[in-house]
Image: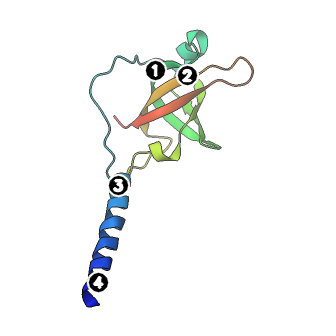
Amino acid sequence: MTRILTASAAALAAALAAMTIPTAARAQYVGPSTVPAVTVQALKDTGKDDQQAVLRGKILGSTGHDRYKFADGTGEMTVKIKPALWPAGQKVSETTTVELVGEYDKELIGESHFDVKAIRLP
């Protein structure tokens, strides 16, 4: 009976450890890319729907529902960031320079936004 309880406790501990490792240690590619870095103004002026891009600037604040106000010195834009994309264990504030990798969601009616696929802290 003691062996069964010990084995069960060990299996439970291993399962819990396996569940917590992916959130604590996320890897991300930081090498070269063919996706061009652009400015907010360039996306607003000539960006196409679903255009892949990299934005560099600062996240000024949350506007609710996974949406944030982003600025890069040429203008401001709404960016959509899912909670799982935030860098684990690293704080991001309005003074932190970030690199956002994603695609431009150009709307015919309403406000266009940038759909973030990855956040890098250069």
Rendering coords of residue 77 (x, y %): 60, 27
Task: Locate residue 93 relative to residue 7 in the image: left or right.
Answer: right
Rendering coords of residue 15 (x, y %): 34, 65
Secondary structure state at the residue bearing disc 4: helix
| Pointer 4 or 1: first along the chain | 4
Secondary structure state at the residue bearing disc 2: strand
When the figure is inspected, residue 77 is found, relative to residue 36, above or below; the finding is below
Rendering coords of residue 102 (x, y %): 48, 27
Q: Whole-Å distance between the Cαs marked 2 and 3?
A: 29 Å
| Camera-nearest label, 4 or 1 | 4
Query: As shown in the figure, which amino acid type bears the numbered disc 3?
Result: Ala
Q: Whole-Å distance between the Cαs marked 3 and 4?
A: 31 Å
Q: Whole-Å distance between the Cαs marked 1 and 3?
A: 27 Å
| Pointer 2 or 3: first along the chain | 3
Residue at the spot 57% in from the left edge and 13% down from the top edge: 48
Q: Residues within 10 Å of mark 2 (few under 14, many from 20)?
A: many
Quadrant housing the C terminus:
top left
Give the camera-side residue of 1 and 11. Answer: 1
- Residue corresponding to mark 4: 4
| Pointer 2 or 1: first along the chain | 1
| Pointer 4 or 2: first along the chain | 4
Secondary structure state at the residue bearing disc 1: strand
Disc marking residue 104? 2
Disc marking residue 24? 3
Residue at the spot 40% in from the left edge and 16% down from the top edge: 36
Query: As shown in the figure, which amino acid type bears the numbered disc 2?
Result: Tyr
- Residue corresponding to mark 1: 53
Secondary structure state at the residue bearing disc 3: helix
